[in-house]
Image (cartoon, grey):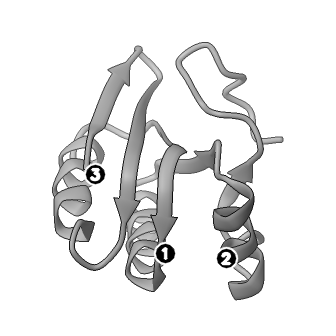
């Protein structure tokens, strides 16, 4: 699972590609834990390159949100395909996680939509 990371002084952007599911979630967790270990800030996860997301991927995003909330940081998720967005909506997670339509990059608006 390719993950590219960009930083600026106020946030990190993790662009994920491929599948985020049971066989790749541990790799995703390792990357996200290293990003969330720093000082409080914003973490944007861009799912624009994700072709498949299962319940283990959703669970990991919820775990990441809880970890960031506890550290005084925030999580935004953007760029999800229609299929991935439907999964968020069907599980009610679209109301629990800051889910944005557009891909998130360093130049994206940092304020919640």
Quick one: SS at disc 3? Answer: helix
Residue 79: where, in percent of width, then height?
65, 42
Q: Kindly report the distance in space between the C-alpha atoms of the residues bearing marks 3 and 2.
A: 21 Å
Estimate how packed mark 1 is, as few (under 14), some (14 to 19) or many (20 or more) residues with alpha carbons within 10 Å: some
Position of 22 relative to 111 (above/below): below
Q: Nearer the viewer, residue 75 or 101?
A: 101
Which is more foreground, mark 3 or mark 2?
A: 2
Q: Residue at x 28, y 79 (%)?
A: 22
Estimate how packed mark 3 is, as few (under 14), some (14 to 19) or many (20 or more) residues with alpha carbons within 10 Å: some
Residue 1: where, in percent of width, then height?
25, 50
Quick one: SS at disc 2? Answer: helix
From the image, tell me which residue sits under label 2.
87
Residue 25: where, in percent of width, then height?
26, 69
Residue 107, quarter of the rendered image: top right
Estimate how packed mark 2 is, as few (under 14), some (14 to 19) or many (20 or more) residues with alpha carbons within 10 Å: some
Q: Residue at x 45, y 36 (%)?
A: 41
Q: Kindly report the distance in space between the C-alpha atoms of the residues bearing marks 3 and 1.
A: 14 Å
From the image, tell me which residue sits under label 1.
58
Position of 27 relative to 43 (above/below): below
Question: Does residue 68 appear left or right of residue 80 in this picture?
Answer: left
From the image, tell me which residue sits under label 3.
32
Q: Kindly report the distance in space between the C-alpha atoms of the residues bearing marks 2 and 1.
A: 9 Å
Q: Earlier in the sequence, mark 3 or mark 1?
A: 3
Residue 96, quarter of the rendered image: bottom right
Q: Are marks 2 and 1 in contact (CB under 8 Å)?
A: yes
């Amino acid at each position: 699972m390719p993950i590219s990371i960009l930083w600026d002084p106020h946030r990190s952007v993790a662009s994920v590609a491929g599948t985020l599911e049971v066989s790749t979630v541990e790799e995703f967790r390792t990357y996200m834990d290293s990003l969330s270990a720093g000082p409080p800030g914003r973490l944007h996860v861009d799912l624009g390159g994700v072709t498949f997301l299962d319940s283990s991927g959703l669970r990991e995003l919820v775990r990441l949100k809880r970890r960031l909330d506890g550290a005084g940081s925030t999580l935004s998720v953007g760029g999800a395909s229609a299929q991935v967005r439907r999964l968020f909506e069907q599980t009610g997670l679209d109301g629990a996680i800051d889910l944005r339509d557009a891909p998130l990059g360093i130049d994206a608006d940092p304020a919640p939509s």
